[in-house]
Image: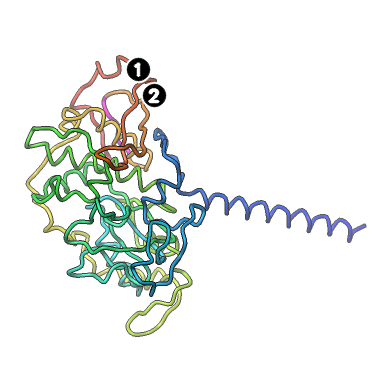
């Protein structure tokens, strides 16, 4: 009797383990369909994955050998690297690239003058490589072409106001320099010269972050990142079983906390400080006065990503809807704010000085 009970118990735990394992696999297989609170996506999952650089066998993607000739590449057949860490530009990707490089991995950035060939042996840390280049949709001149996909995608996020301010302060950041401009569908940009770049950057923050959430396996918020966070990025990238080189010696797996602390200690947190003009300042109200819908969309997405932002109007019932539309003869990622279920008088009580952003 005792043996029979033990047998039944073993069968029970085996069945439970199988169920949990299958649940985990299902979650992994559908991780690109992650839903942010207040955001709804209308596009087909495989259309999103095909436009991205995420490797998705469930959508018919085939892995080619790294040595395969370029002539054999197409949208579904490419070589595959291990990991991509990506986000909107000015979100700290240079710092993360340097940290992972100091850990001993070949995870380069996207500037061909300093960091390539790209991608690295183990992947890339780049805001450029979230979407694929096409003949009608080229990467910026300073970034090399890549014909690869990535097994894992880590989404790196920075608070919207910080990104918008940093992006808007770049004199070169205009409609011709927008990364993947032809893959992201922008609304009409304000004619106010003071706010033009900020308006572009605001839209870019919403568009690119909502797209990346659909393909990401893990998200890191740079404001709260610590040494442990970058060890977690290493593990989420699937680098734990990879042999890395540190000071000429081969080591396997992600670093210990002590080794990681030594690796990141020399890295400046203002590593790309010279990219921007630090004299430009504005607040949420200036964005709201320029484009109410896109500003509230940014607030909704930011709150869903863990940022503590409170506008002086109700956002209850507002929904950000995103997906591909056909524009200019191409399929472009588009977002709009759906107010159909919102309080119709919410905006009547707007007070410009009551914005609260403690992100």
Q: Which residues are magenta?
A: 308-312
Most prominent secondary structure in the magenta stretch? loop
**Percent x, y of residue 49:** 41, 50
147 up-or-down from 165: above or below: below
**In front of the other: 187 or 92:** 187
The image quadrant where one finds the C terminus is top left
Q: Residue furthest front?
A: 71
Would you say 195 lies left or right of 217 here? left
Within the image, what quadrant is residue 296 found in? top left
Task: Tell me the crowding category of disc 2: few under 14, some 14 to 19, or many 20 or more residues within 10 angstroms, Cα based.
Answer: few
Residue at image location 41% in from the left, 34% down from the top? 40
Mark 2 sits on what residue? 317
- Say if the magenta span includes residue 215: no
The image quadrant where one finds the N terminus is bottom right
**Percent x, y of residue 193:** 6, 36
Mark 1 sits on what residue? 343
353 up-or-down from 78: above or below: above
Q: Residue furthest bottom?
A: 248
Would you say 132 lies left or right of 24 here? left
30 up-or-down from 65: above or below: above
């Amino acid at each position: 009797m005792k043996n029979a009970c033990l047998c039944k118990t073993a069968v029970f735990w085996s069945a439970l383990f199988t169920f949990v394992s299958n649940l985990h696999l299902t979650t992994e297989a559908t991780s690109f369909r992650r839903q942010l609170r207040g955001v709804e996506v209308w596009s087909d999952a495989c259309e999103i994955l095909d436009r991205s650089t995420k490797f998705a066998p469930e959508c018919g993607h085939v892995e080619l050998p790294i040595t395969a000739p370029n002539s054999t590449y197409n949208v579904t057949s490419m070589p595959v690297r291990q990991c991509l860490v990506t986000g909107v530009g000015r979100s700290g990707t240079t710092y993360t690239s340097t940290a992972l490089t100091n850990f001993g991995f070949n995870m380069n950035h996207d500037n061909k003058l300093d960091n390539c060939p790209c991608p690295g042996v183990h992947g890339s840390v780049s805001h450029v490589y979230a979407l694929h280049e096409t003949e009608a949709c080229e990467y910026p001149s300073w970034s090399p072409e890549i014909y690869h996909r990535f097994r894992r995608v880590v989404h790196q996020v920075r608070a919207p106001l910080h990104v918008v301010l940093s992006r808007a302060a770049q004199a070169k950041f205009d409609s011709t320099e927008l990364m993947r401009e032809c893959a992201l569908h922008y609304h009409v940009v304000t004619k106010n010269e003071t706010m033009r770049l900020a308006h572009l950057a605001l839209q870019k923050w919403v568009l690119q972050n909502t797209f990346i959430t659909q393909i990401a396996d893990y998200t890191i918020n740079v404001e709260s990142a610590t040494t442990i966070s970058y060890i977690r990025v290493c593990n989420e990238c699937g680098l734990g079983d990879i042999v890395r080189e540190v000071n000429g010696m081969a080591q396997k797996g992600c670093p210990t906390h002590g080794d990681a602390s030594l690796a990141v200690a020399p890295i400046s947190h203002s590593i790309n400080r010279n990219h921007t003009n630090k004299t430009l300042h504005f607040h949420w109200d200036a964005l709201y006065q320029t484009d109410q819908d896109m500003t509230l969309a940014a607030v909704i997405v930011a709150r869903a990503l863990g940022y503590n932002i409170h506008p002086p109007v109700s956002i209850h019932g507002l929904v950000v809807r995103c997906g591909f539309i056909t524009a200019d003869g191409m399929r472009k990622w588009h977002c709009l704010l759906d107010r159909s279920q919102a309080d119709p008088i919410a905006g009547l009580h707007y007070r410009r000085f009551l914005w609260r952003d403690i992100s």
